[in-house]
Image: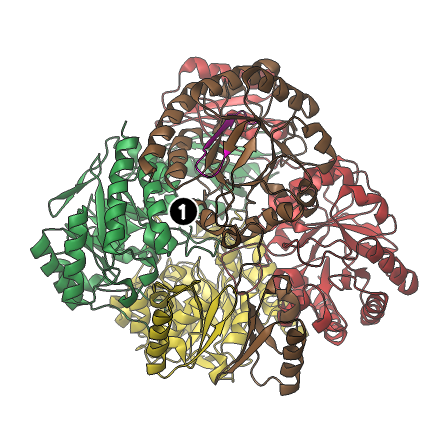
Chain colours: A red, B brown, C yellow, D green
């Protein structure tokens, strides 16, 4: 950690800060330049509070050099983590093709989609039972009934299921869910993350609309620090000034996350873009960039979808895409 | 609502959509131009799902003309809402000067700050007991004990208290809290908002880092739709590419929110900026722009603060600022 | 175009506006709803000024339905444009692999890089002679001498050359340059664009850091409107809140631009990311997303580069990447 | 400057870098921690190229500690700069109230507006003759004729005039213009800035839509480094995800710029917001935050304006605003 001091800081106060750091077993090195004085703090500074130090009268700026994340950090865990969910694997060369409707709507709908995506090569089934909606007047999901319909689709097709949790009080309802999803709007709902540290299933953690790559890793750190080593990171688009697409897919996050962390990285092109006809191009881009999986919205009759219809593919389109995904995976194989 | 259709859409499908809308009691008007065909949908479209319609094969784009928010909308409620919390008022000409430490740390700390800010003219006391922290290794607040210390400060000074809730299961602990704050990271924690619709206290709702003005209003709509008419909107900075300040205070949000809604609007310059020495300039700007209140971090000895020290004023600085706030309020009085 | 009027606008003023529009040969349709009144304006509204109409007392909002761009619009020119530059082609299935150093530094450097990238499969050579630098104290390029060195590299290797213009007064110096590049910071230097409408070479137009996809197309429209039909669009990353990468590559811009326009689209992953080791992943993503070309920085000894060294590949890395690019292109071939 | 090295960097390469820095008269200090090795570089590093060093094999990250700007830096020039333009002053307590139409349209228009704003208390007249327009089909300004009309308005009212330059070849036309404006889209047109270093008039430099505060200062540095000490910095809104206002006024830039630099800072609320009815609130906010001036669009009959009508005030509205501005200035006087 680098602490930049203000010009003409009293020597006494600099000494006071240096002593405080030394007492905590940090090595401190002082460099005095013509225009600025710098303290280099050496040791594990992850528990030091940047803002508290910035609050000191003599401090102009604090710059963290080490990453504040530990458990998710590839430096301390160089090998790819591999996760198992309902028989399927993800990470370390195992690719997850997760597909399904935005919302579970009915028995017929989820069965039809589940069979179709399985036939096309999907390895997991997704479906929303609890839906975060911007407006209180929009459809909020079938809730417990939706989870039960997903369970039935799993029983019939054998596909592991992925569904989103919005409230920690619902955790018991997720017993048969193989991967618990945390939505972008809850990425920094720290109480929820902490509780999911006690879940036994992998957590698929979506990046928040305005969250940096490092904040995503810090949120994953909450789950790992709570005792659950299985977090799948999900890039799903960030909010920028561009309005043509719903969000901006940050494709660079794929190689960056894979370098910084050992956790698997999946991409959700459907939410990133919001336009079904551009989902195939973004899916292939994600695979080419090295993603460990894709999460794609598929709907049997998109025009009837109660939510997010604009971003869902039909089964036949998904099937064509799945074929291309396999070809691109082979092309980028080392 | 305007629905832009794709070129050469089959007449049959256009008719199908038109009939579906007509059955729901909307008036529909079709305009055929050389390069595009437009459906104008007239009526209360707030319950129509934009994305579901965008999912239709024949639809190129859907544009909402009416605001989707109702209960918070000034069009349907032209008079300023005035809220009462522990004897203090806010809105409709009543100004709230809310001050206090980022985190409650000890009996001595909260008492000293409470007395100091009251003497300087604060009308409410703020203090965090549950703290949302990016890192699981950072201080997370004194929790229930922090709320108890706030209660004691209120008993002694008479100042109503404001504190943040992070988990709906804690609601019972907030019985003596006069205004319940929802933090920026929970602005779209819809389950929490829905439950706060049942609280009897006003809710101070902070704008999320990447949320638009309209999304803030939609989140407030959740609380009002749940039965609680008392929401105070809080602008606290949005996330942009600028890194000199912690966030970018969106000062325009003040006049825009006051035009769109009857709810009071307060500004939190401390979190918006993150640099204590710039808090006074931003506070005065907020007052000049028409804010109904300010929420400012004040700490007795900033260098000891366990969190957010960089953005806290000392009591003497707050006192000078409070005087200037009063002068600017007078200057902009109509 | 949709014009949303304010509530209770005087009938007289509405009539005045309607007549003004009708006189300009637009068809106008008035819809009066309970809460708003809408004018639908039908015809070619590209020359109507949105802001001037928004300035009218009775107008609440103006929404453009048609795209304001014409010459670059695929609707009016459905077939891919193919451009020829110094013997190489781009667009309509012809892929351009453009490579070279950020800045031309010396005869030895440009020759060595030119030979190496040609051997690896590059189809064009890039190199900066005039460099836009944030600081007036940074190296500003070899200028005319740099262009002369590029000309020599072209003479020897046969590779067409691409270089950036910063000032229209330098146009004569670019006689032997096969593609004239306009940098991101000049994307809205409209005087420069207008003059390039008179150039006979294709223009490679980089998207500005804060410019939307539609603004990029409007800037290309300037060149086409000026008489030069050959513009190559270049996505090179936009500015967002994420600071890990230098910019955020907007991969979605590739399929969106190709849908909206007939012009070729290339991607510059080197500037988008700023980190050489992530350039291969982003390059392959761009190819998988359908880009017509790549522009990649390659340097013989990156540690000696006087500018942008961090984002340059060595020739051996470029050669490995070029092989993978060919494999991914085959995989995504229809 | 801090250079963070990669783990296990060869000792030889570290020594090589250290020697290279030492030869350039920097003092270098090496700190070896458990997980990282840091080089502290002490001396005037403003001419060192961050990216070139980042390109080195052994370097993970380079962090600049000193500001790279010199001539504009308050550290080296603590006293406010005061500029004189056509008799009016700005900076160091002198407030500039600049008002006028977006575009000069006719003799009658500019005369009427000039007289009205002078009567209301404006100290300078603005008016666009060369207009940067997103679309090649929009009105591009009256050009030389517009400048001549401004000159006549100056002759009659005595108000100094401010107008925008888009092309350095037009500099001779600006002989009678008292302040030369550089628009947001040209903030990094470095060739233009360099040439304006030779102009004898003050330059009003607008912040680019996606440019940081530090980049604005670096662009000002170009003008000062070129020999012209008179630059007025102008905050006019940045581009964010919020679409309700045209841009987001970064009010924090006012106190930050005034702290970092001795140059005067003005705010343009008209372009920042794009909505005339919110211009007064933002103007007062800017004054309260400490701005040295305002630049406000005023139009005699906004509905006839050929450009940017939505953001123009009528003279009577401007007059009321000017009165409030004076009251707020008094209120924030120390």
* Element assignment for label 1: loop
Mark 1 — on which chain does it sit? Answer: D
**Residue A61 placed where, x, y %?**
46, 31
Vertical placement of residue A82 versus D24, above or below:
below
Residue A76 visible in this rendered orientation of the protein: no
Segment tinted magenta in the rendering: B90-102
- The structure residue drawn at horizontal position 21% and vertical position 37%, both measured from the top left corner, is D81
Q: How many neighbours does mark 1 have within 10 angstroms: few (below 14), some (14-19), or many (20 or more)?
A: some
The C terminus of chain B is located in which quarter?
top left
The N terminus of chain B sits in image quarter: bottom right
Left or right: B278 as drawn, with respect to B28? left
User: Where residue B2 sits: x, y (%)?
Assistant: 54, 71
Give the vertical position of B274 relative to C172 (above or below): above
Q: Is residue D59 above or below residue D40?
A: below
Relative placement, left or right, of C116 versus C329 is: left
Furthest-right residue in this view = A155
Frontmost residue, B27 versus D122: B27
């Amino acid at each position: 950690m680098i602490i930049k001091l203000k010009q003409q800081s009293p020597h006494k106060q600099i000494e006071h800060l240096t002593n405080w750091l030394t007492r905590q077993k940090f090595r401190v090195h002082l460099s005095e330049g013509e225009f600025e004085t710098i303290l280099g703090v050496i040791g594990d500074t992850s528990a030091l509070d940047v803002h508290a130090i910035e609050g000191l009268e003599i401090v102009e700026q604090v710059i963290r050099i080490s990453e504040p994340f530990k458990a998710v950090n590839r430096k301390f865990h160089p090998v790819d983590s591999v996760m198992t969910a309902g028989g399927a694997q993800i990470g370390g060369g195992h690719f997850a093709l997760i597909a399904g409707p935005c919302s579970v709507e009915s028995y017929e709908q989820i069965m039809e989609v589940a069979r179709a995506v399985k036939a096309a090569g999907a390895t997991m089934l997704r479906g929303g039972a609890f839906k975060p909606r911007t407006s209180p007047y929009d459809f909020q999901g079938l809730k417990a009934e939706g989870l039960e319909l997903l369970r039935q689709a799993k029983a019939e097709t054998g596909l592991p299921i992925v569904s989103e949790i919005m409230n920690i009080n619902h955790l018991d309802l997720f017993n048969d869910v193989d991967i618990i999803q945390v939505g972008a709007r809850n990425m920094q709902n720290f109480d929820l993350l902490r509780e999911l540290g006690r879940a036994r299933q992998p957590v698929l953690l979506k990046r928040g609309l305005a969250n940096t790559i490092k904040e995503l890793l810090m949120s994953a750190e909450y789950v790992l620090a709570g005792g659950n080593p299985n977090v799948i990171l999900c890039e799903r688009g960030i909010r920028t000034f561009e309005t043509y697409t719903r969000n901006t897919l940050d494709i660079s996050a794929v190689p960056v996350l894979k370098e910084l962390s050992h956790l698997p990285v999946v991409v959700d092109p459907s939410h990133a873009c919001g336009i079904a006809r551009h989902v195939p191009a973004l899916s292939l881009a994600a695979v080419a960039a090295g993603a460990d999986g894709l999460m794609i919205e598929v709907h049997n009759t998109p025009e009837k979808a109660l939510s997010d219809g604009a971003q869902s593919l039909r089964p036949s389109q998904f099937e064509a895409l799945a074929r291309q995904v396999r070809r691109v995976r082979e092309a980028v194989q080392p």
